[in-house]
């Protein structure tokens, strides 16, 4: 599956998918250029995941809403819940492991943990 270009205009619609992985990048960023083929190759191995790229130069508002301070930054949603966000480039096997682990999560348990955490505040 090819990656999609994520913008503030298609963000909500894209979030309707089960699992979405985001790559925040910029054209001038060397590590971003190195990570791009790794991200693209992983998209072929995980056709059940939406792979989306966010150009931080063009989508400053979207990048700002995620408080992206370093690129590349990877973020993963499942069922509209942000489960992972970390700056830095991941190797292909680590990207696969991350996605495999996210696929195994019990989302009812995750939502319960989030609700309990909010009730303690």
Image (spheres, rainbow, N blue to C red):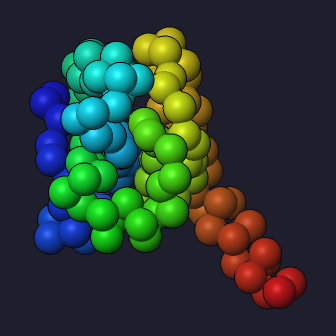
Place of residue 14 in the rendered image (x, y in percent of width and height, measured from the top left): 22, 59
Q: Is residue 63 above or below residue 91?
A: below
The residue at 36%/45% (across/down) is 24
Q: Is residue 19 visible?
A: yes
The residue at 50%/23% (across/down) is 90
| The image quarter in which residue 11 lies | bottom left
| The image quarter in which residue 17 lies | bottom left
Residue at the right extreme, as displayed: 120
Question: Residue 101 or 43: which is nearer the viewer?
Answer: 43
Place of residue 45 in the rendered image (x, y in percent of width and height, measured from the top left): 30, 18
Place of residue 15 in the rendered image (x, y in percent of width and height, measured from the top left): 30, 62
Q: Quadrant of the N terminus?
A: top left
Place of residue 16 in the rendered image (x, y in percent of width and height, measured from the top left): 27, 64
Q: Is residue 15 left or right of residue 106?
A: left
Number of marks:
0
Q: Is residue 46 visible?
A: no
The residue at 35%/23% (across/down) is 30
| The image quarter in which residue 25 lies | top left
The residue at 68%/60% (across/down) is 109
Q: Is residue 52 above or below residue 32?
A: below
Q: Quadrant of the C terminus?
A: bottom right
Question: Residue 31 or 111: which is nearer the viewer?
Answer: 31
Q: Is residue 96 left or right of residue 33?
A: right
Q: Is residue 117 above or below residue 51?
A: below
Question: Residue 100 or 85: which is nearer the viewer?
Answer: 85
């Amino acid at each position: 599956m090819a990656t999609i270009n994520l913008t503030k205009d298609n963000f909500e619609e894209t979030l309707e998918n089960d699992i979405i992985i985001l790559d925040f990048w910029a054209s001038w960023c060397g590590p971003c250029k190195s990570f791009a083929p790794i991200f693209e190759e992983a998209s072929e191995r995980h056709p059940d995941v939406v792979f989306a790229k966010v150009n931080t130069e063009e989508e400053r508002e979207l990048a700002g809403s995620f408080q992206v301070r370093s690129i590349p930054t990877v973020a993963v949603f499942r069922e509209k819940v942000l489960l992972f966000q970390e700056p830095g480039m991941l190797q292909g096997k680590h990207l696969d492991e991350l996605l495999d682990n996210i696929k195994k999560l019990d989302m009812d348990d995750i939502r319960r943990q989030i609700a309990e955490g909010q009730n303690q505040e």
